[in-house]
Image: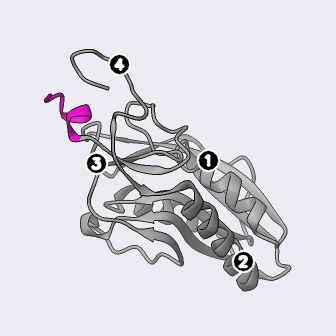
Amino acid sequence: MTASAGRIDLVADIGEVLVSEEQIAAKVTELGARIGADYGDRRLTLVSVLKGSLPFMADLMRAIPSPVRIDLMEVSSYGGTSTESSGLVRILKDLSATIEGEDVLIVEDIIDTGLTLNYLIRYLRGKNPKSLRICTLLDKPARRLVDIPVDYVGFTIPDQFVVGYGLDYGEYYRNLRFVGVLRPEVYTGLD
C-alpha cells in the first residue's frame, strides 16, 4: 500500500515470503500433535486474542486430538505507534466462560516485545486456571523486553515487520496464506 496512492497490493507489498503456507500447515500439525501428547484426554481451553491469532487457532484446534474448547479475548495496546506495542493494555472483550480449574493454552500469532502477553498472563492467572501455557506461531526474540516462558513455538523469526496468516498492517494482509515481510515503504510512507 503505497502511502501516496493508498492502494493495497497483496503481492507487490510483500518483500519476501518468510514462512510459506506449506511450512505453516506442517508446523500446525506438529504443534497439534505435541499439545495432544502433552494433554492426552484432559480437557483444554484455548484462548485466542483477537484478531491476529484467529487463523492459527482455527487450524491448531483441528490439529489437537485432545478435547478442546475455545474462548476469545480482545485487547488493545495503546500509547504506541501503529507498528509498536506500548504494553499498556485495555481489555475490550473478556472471556465468555470461567477458566478456574481448567488447563488453559494461550494461542498467539506472534510474540514480539512480550509486553501485552505479560499483562495477559498475569490477568489470566488471576482467574485461577489449573495450568496456563503459551503457544505462538511466531517468536521474535530480538525485540523481547520481558521474559516470557513460551511452551510451544512454531517459528523463530528475525526482527522484520511481518504480515499474513492473521497478522496485519492497518487491518489488511490478514488473509494472506503465508507470512511475509512487508516492504518498509508501505509502513514508512517513503517511496
**Element carrying mark 1:** helix
Residue behind mark 3: 86
Q: Is residue 62 left or right of residue 79?
A: right
Left or right of 184 on screen, residue 85: right
Identify the mark nearer the N-term, 2 or 1. 2
- Tell me the crowding category of disc 2: few under 14, some 14 to 19, or many 20 or more residues within 10 angstroms, Cα based: some
Residue at 46% in and 69% down? 155
Magenta region: which residues? Answer: 184-191
| Residue at the spot of label 1 | 54
- Which quadrant holds residue 185? top left
Cα–Cα span, label 4 and label 3: 28 Å
Q: Identify the amino acid type marked 2.
A: Ala
Cα gap from disc 3 to disc 1, whole angstroms: 22 Å
Does residue 75 lie above or below 47 as drawn? above
Residue 33 is marked as 2
Q: Secondary structure at mark 4?
A: loop
- Callout 2 touching callout 4 (CB < 8 Å): no
